[in-house]
């Protein structure tokens, strides 16, 4: 399985639509790296993947009950509730290998509010469209067989949370389920439980009582079959009548139209069209009239507007010039200058000349001919008219004239249709005939509905009785075959038990070797865990190499006792001692050593308690275990990890970056902060990165956006 894409809409801090592409094109690049600071939305994305794949099962619920809906409500973006229509959802696109082919499926879960209540709309699509109910059920079962809901944390690895699972005494059940499911052993386990259950079941029945019950149910099935056939005839007859009435309605409508009839709906449409056309015609006519009476006479001087504007400007300046030259005198300026203590005979003349030169309309100093002599208001009006002439849109006026012509034709055509329509009295006759047919159709439809309702009830009763008949028949048959089946089931149960035990031993042995192999690959200490033993119930016993002298071994045997000593060195250590000294058990070896004077060194093991490992060492062991299980199962499943280096020290992060992430799966999705996959580890991972994203959170709006880059660049 591979995750190709996920789309979040108003989910958690992801406001609106956010799409993240997880597809991998290059087999050498298997990592999707998603960065973000704490609170940016990494955990929300993690949650969205779980919810999209499994819905209620992500939280351990069988269906969309009130508890599940309450959880979903808490995941909807707060801004969604501020909209008129509350909408949110997640959509995930996955590729699955089904029947030997890789097929793509789109899983969608949308949530919406109706009458202040939240509902979920769930569907799955492939290249042919939405899956039907039976196909959807098959798809869900298949998906859950690949990645069962109770193994979410196995594939969606949270560095902070997974350590808690292995800190409990029930971690063995978790690991056993993962191994059995991924390696296909769950099928054998189901068969074993089923056959055991069948063997233990008491199937004795009263054959005579069963036969009487069977005869009664059989008679009821025969009666219902006869009733079903009668109702089928009634339904067929009612359908024939309805078809005939539909034909009569079509024929009546055709005759009505041929006679010039216009029904109420058509008349309303024509009247609406006429009204709309009249409005447009009036608007265009008014616009044309305004143009003809106002603007059109002035368009004949459009080519002279520039000359006219220049002349008006000259006349305006001339007017000011004449006013100043007649009003302001040189002696007035001299008087003013003397008041300010300035005495210069030539200065008054120069100032007056300078002032008048500012308003000289042309080089001939005010001798231009005055043609119009307009007042200020008249001049403003003329300038406004010139502006209108220059900005006049001829094409718009042509368009207006065309609209006027078109709307006139439309109104004329509608008038013709309405005038040529059928007379009211004739239309009433057609309406009366139509009403009679409609009443008959209504009556026949009701009759068909009642027949169909009775038929559905008979079909339901018939199905129930047929199932009951078959069940009773099977019980009679089972009773006759009970002894043979009992012996067969007992034999099958024994075979399944032996097969399951043999296969489990083989898997445990391979898993032990793979865990140690992976630890050597990513753990820097050579002697932390050198040997792993997995018990029948999948408890882990971890050992490291330890060298003892014979006297130390004797002291351990005396102080701990035989049982505790065996637990300390493990089964392999016991086997080594037996092989060295040729004795059958630890007690015999203890007597032999006590009688010897030698003190030679023996290479054995020392047990390490899993829950006494540091949090970082425990996470490294868990990563090695996960890697080993995926290698053992040979399953193509995406590995998604949040907070990848949660408890791991800096000395081991480099090893995990170089060896673990590029190899654990064909698709690895890493959610990290810049303090975990920092610049150093980013450079190590870069050759294996297919896509990288950054989750950026706007703290003011609590809104997450997705950008196509990571914290660093290489």
Image: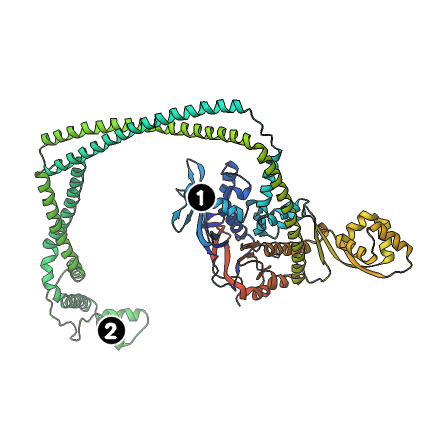
Q: Earlier in the sequence, mark 2 or mark 1?
A: 1
Residue 474 position in % (x across, y down): 50, 31
| Numbered circle sitting on residue 136 | 1
Residue 617 position in % (x across, y down): 68, 56
Residue 63 position in % (x across, y down): 50, 38
Above or below 287: residue 466 = above
| Numbered circle sitting on residue 354 | 2
Front of the two marks 2 and 1:
1
Q: Residues within 10 Å of mark 1 (few under 14, many from 20)?
A: some
Above or below 222: residue 510 = below
- Tell whether 584 sits left or right of 66: right
Secondary structure of residue under mark 2: helix
- Tell whether 64 sits left or right of 192: left
- Check if mark 2's residue and mark 1's residue have beta carbons within 8 Å: no
- Tell whether 358 sits left or right of 626: left
- Residue 328 in sight: yes
Secondary structure of residue under mark 1: helix
| Numbered circle sitting on residue 314 | none
Q: Quadrant of residue 438?
A: top left
Query: Along the line of sight, which residue is nearer the eye, 46 or 306?
Result: 46
Q: Quadrant of residue 398?
A: bottom left
Q: Quadrant of residue 579?
A: bottom right
């Amino acid at each position: 399985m591979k995750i190709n894409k996920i789309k979040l809409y108003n989910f958690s801090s992801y406001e609106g639509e956010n799409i993240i592409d997880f597809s991998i094109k290059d087999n050498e690049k298997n990592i999707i790296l998603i960065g973000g600071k704490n609170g940016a939305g990494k955990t929300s994305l993690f949650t969205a993947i779980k919810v999209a794949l499994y819905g209620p099962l992500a939280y351990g619920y069988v269906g969309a009950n009130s508890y599940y809906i309450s959880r979903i409500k808490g995941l909807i973006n707060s801004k969604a509730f501020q909209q008129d229509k509350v909408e949110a959802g997640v959509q995930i696109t996955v590729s699955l290998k089904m029947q030997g082919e890789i097929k793509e499926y789109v899983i969608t879960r949308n949530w919406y509010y109706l009458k202040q209540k939240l509902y979920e709309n769930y569907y799955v699509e492939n290249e042919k469209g939405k899956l039907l109910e039976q196909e959807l059920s098959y798809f869900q079962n298949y998906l859950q067989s690949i990645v069962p809901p109770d193994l979410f944390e196995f594939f969606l690895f949270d560095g902070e949370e997974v350590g808690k699972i292995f800190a409990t005494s029930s971690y063995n059940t978790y690991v056993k389920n993962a191994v059995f499911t991924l390696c296909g052993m769950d099928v054998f386990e189901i068969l074993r439980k089923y056959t055991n259950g069948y063997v233990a079941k008491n199937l004795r029945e009263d054959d005579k009582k069963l036969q009487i019950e069977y005869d009664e149910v059989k008679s009821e099935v025969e009666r219902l079959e006869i009733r079903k056939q009668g109702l089928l005839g009634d339904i067929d007859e009612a359908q024939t009548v309805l078809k005939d009435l539909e034909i009569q309605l079509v024929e009546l409508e055709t005759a009505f139209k041929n006679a010039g009839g216009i029904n109420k709906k058509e008349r309303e449409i024509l009247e609406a069209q006429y009204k709309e056309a009249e409005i447009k015609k009036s608007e265009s006519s008014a616009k044309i009239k305004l143009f003809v009476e106002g603007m059109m006479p002035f368009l004949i001087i459009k080519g002279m507007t520039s000359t006219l504007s220049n002349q008006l400007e000259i006349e305006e300046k001339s007017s000011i010039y004449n006013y100043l030259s007649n009003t302001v005198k040189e002696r007035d300026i001299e008087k003013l200058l003397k008041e300010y203590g300035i005495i210069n005979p030539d200065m008054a003349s120069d100032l007056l000349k300078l002032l008048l030169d500012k308003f000289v309309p042309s080089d001939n100093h005010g001798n231009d001919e005055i043609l119009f002599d307009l007042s200020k208001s008249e001049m403003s009006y003329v300038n406004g008219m010139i502006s209108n002439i220059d900005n006049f849109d001829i094409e718009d006026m042509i368009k207006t004239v065309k609209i006027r012509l078109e709307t006139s034709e439309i109104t004329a055509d509608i008038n013709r249709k309405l005038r040529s329509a059928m007379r009211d009295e004739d239309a009433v006759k057609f309406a009366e005939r139509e009403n009679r047919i409609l009443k008959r159709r209504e009556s026949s439809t009701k009759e068909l509905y009642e027949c169909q309702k009775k038929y559905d009830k008979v079909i339901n009763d018939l199905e129930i009785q047929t199932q009951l008949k078959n069940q009773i028949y099977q019980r009679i048959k089972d009773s006759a075959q009970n002894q043979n089946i009992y012996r067969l089931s007992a034999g099958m149960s024994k075979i399944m038990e032996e097969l399951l035990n043999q296969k489990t031993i083989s898997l445990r042995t391979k898993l032990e070797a793979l865990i140690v192999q992976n630890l050597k690959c990513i753990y820097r200490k050579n002697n932390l865990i050198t040997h792993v033993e997995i018990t029948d119930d999948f408890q882990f016993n971890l050992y490291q190499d330890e060298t003892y002298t014979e006297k130390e071994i004797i002291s351990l045997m005396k102080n701990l006792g035989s049982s505790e000593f065996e637990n300390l060195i493990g089964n392999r250590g016991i086997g080594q001692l037996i092989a060295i000294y040729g004795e059958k058990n630890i007690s015999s070896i203890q007597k032999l050593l006590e009688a010897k004077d030698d003190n030679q060194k023996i290479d054995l093991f020392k047990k390490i308690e899993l829950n006494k490992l540091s949090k970082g060492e425990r996470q490294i062991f868990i990563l090695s275990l996960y890697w080993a299980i995926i290698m053992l199962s040979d399953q193509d499943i995406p590995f998604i990890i949040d907070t990848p280096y949660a408890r791991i020290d800096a000395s081991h992060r480099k090893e995990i970056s170089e060896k673990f992430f590029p190899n654990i799966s064909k698709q690895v999705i890493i959610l990290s902060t810049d303090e975990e996959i920092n610049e150093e580890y980013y450079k190590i991972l870069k050759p294996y990165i297919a896509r990288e994203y950054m989750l950026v959170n706007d703290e003011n709006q609590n809104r997450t956006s997705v950008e196509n880059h990571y914290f660093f660049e290489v």
